[in-house]
Amino acid sequence: MTDPLFTRLHIAALTASLCVVVVFSAFPGLDLAVSQVFAAPGGGFRAAAVPAIGLLNAVIRRMLELLAFAAVLLTLLAVVLRWRPASGLANWAFLSLVLVAGPGLIVNLLLKEYSGRARPANVLEFGGPHPFTPMLRVAENCSGNCSFSSGETALSSALVFALLVLFWPQMGRLGRGVALAIGLGLIGLTLGLRVALGRHFASDVLFSVAVSAFVCLGLYRLTGLATARARFTPAALRADGLTLVQMLSERAAALLRRPLPTWWPLPR
């Protein structure tokens, strides 16, 4: 069955991605021009010298990592414990797959490891030792965890897009507007910090947003989430939280009641 909204989103994501690729490929100096806005006169980047900005970036990164870890862990627990959450196992599987496939496999394990693109703070134009590499060109200026593309931006985008997909049917018009504003604000803050700190070029962060968008759209169609996401409600999530706590408590109590093995060295 044709999904008009899905089709429009796919066209929008494809158009935006093509614009990013074409513009930054045709005008590679644009990356340097954007980063130059945040560069310090004597080399390096002004934001990198401000502890509060570095702390904000670290807090956002850890928060995103914890949310992603919690989502994947809950999905694995549901499978191991043979538990069918009221909010729908398919929904949690979708969220986990988006996080693992986009930021995990495509960005961190593939692009960042093999692109060889030096980070802005490490290129000659900003006081570093390596030459600048245009977007989509493989280089040997970085041996791992390179600039292309941005892992933090991919993670924030994946979380925002996946959660919007899951909660969208439950939100009214006002709620959708607020959620979009908050989600896009988080993505904008994440990518802005990465560029300002000299950790990524503009094309790095924008390409990561595109990767997360396509992964989310593709998995939405592959997992048949159009009907399953109706179960992803606040009430169902609260019920799942209570059920999970009870299940884990019961299993922990059962383990404590189990007699110690004969090889146990401490007094029994």
Image: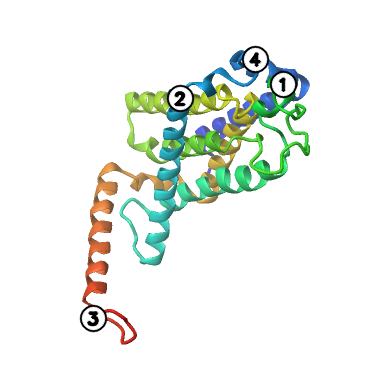
The structure residue drawn at horizontal position 62% and vertical position 29%, both measured from the top left corner, is 200
- Amino acid type, residue under disc 1 in the picture: Val
Query: Helix, strand, or loop for circle 1?
Result: helix
- Amino acid type, residue under disc 4 in the picture: Gly
Q: Earlier in the sequence, mark 1 or mark 2?
A: 1
Mark 2 residue crowding within 10 angstroms, few (<14) / some (14–19) / many (20+): few
Name the residue carrying label 1: 23
Residue 28 % position (x, y): 75, 21
Left or right? Give the position of 37 relative to 5: right
Residue 230 at least partly seen:
yes
Q: Which quarter shows the C terminus?
A: bottom left
The relative height of residue 2 versus residue 240 in the rendered view (above or below) is: above
Q: Earlier in the sequence, mark 4 or mark 1?
A: 1
**What's the mark number on residue 241?**
none
Q: CA distance from mark 4 to mark 2?
A: 19 Å
- Amino acid type, residue under disc 2 in the picture: Pro
Name the residue carrying label 2: 51
Mark 1 residue crowding within 10 angstroms, few (<14) / some (14–19) / many (20+): few
Query: Helix, strand, or loop for circle 2?
Result: helix
Tell me the mark number nearer the camera, choosing from 1 and 2: 2
